[in-house]
């Protein structure tokens, strides 16, 4: 466990300067295809993984309701299982939507919503000999 944590922390510390010093759009820098890979991974997470997690939570909720009302009509054990599934799925929905809202709030606060950062200060280039 410590070895995996150490490897993950080392990788994160190595990649943080690359990502944090990036300025401008993804066309302005290309660290051996890292920018395109990073954009592809975040797009995959936003467009595939997040909706799949919400769909899975919804299916767990539906299964819990099914166990609570239909399968657990006379069996108290199945009713309790259904209640716990419904409760856990509702808590999961609340947590997912809360985190989604916080991420959007932070992204909107820093101007990262939709188009990336806006009005990034740029260091002036070298002056010519005539100036």
Image (cartoon, rainbow, N blue to C red):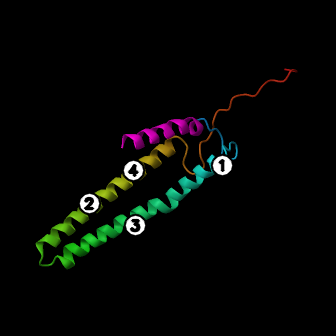
Q: Which mark is residue 20?
A: none
Identify the residue position indicated by label 4 in the image: 99
- Residue at left offset 86%, top offset 20%: 129
> Could you give the CA–CA distance between mark 1 and mark 3, rounded to whole angstroms?
32 Å
* Contact? badges 1 and 4 (CB < 8 Å): no
Within 10 Å of the Cα at label 3, are there few (<14), some (14-19), or many (20+) other Cα atoms? few
> Could you give the CA–CA distance between mark 2 and mark 4, rounded to whole angstroms?
16 Å
Instruction: Provide the residue span drawn in magenta.
Output: 1-20
Identify the residue position indicated by label 1 in the image: 33
Viewer-proximal residue, 16 or 11? Answer: 11
The residue lying furthest to the right in this view is 130
Q: In terms of sequence position, does the residue under pointer 3 or pointer 4 come before the other?
A: 3
Identify the residue position indicated by label 2 in the image: 88
What secondary structure is marked by label 2?
Answer: helix
Q: Is residue 55 magenta?
A: no
Q: Which mark is residue 55?
A: 3
């Amino acid at each position: 466990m410590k070895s995996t944590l150490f490897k993950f922390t080392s990788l994160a510390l190595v990649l943080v300067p690359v990502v944090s010093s990036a300025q401008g759009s993804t066309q302005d820098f290309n660290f051996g295809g890292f920018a395109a890979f990073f954009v592809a991974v975040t797009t995959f997470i936003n467009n595939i993984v997040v909706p799949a997690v919400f769909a899975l939570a919804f299916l767990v909720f539906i299964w819990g309701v099914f166990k609570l009302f239909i399968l657990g009509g006379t069996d108290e054990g199945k009713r309790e299982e259904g209640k716990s599934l419904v409760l856990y799925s509702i808590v999961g929905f609340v947590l997912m939507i809360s985190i989604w809202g916080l991420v959007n709030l932070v992204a909107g606060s820093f101007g990262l919503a939709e188009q990336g950062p806006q009005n990034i200060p740029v260091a002036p280039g070298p002056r010519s000999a005539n100036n």
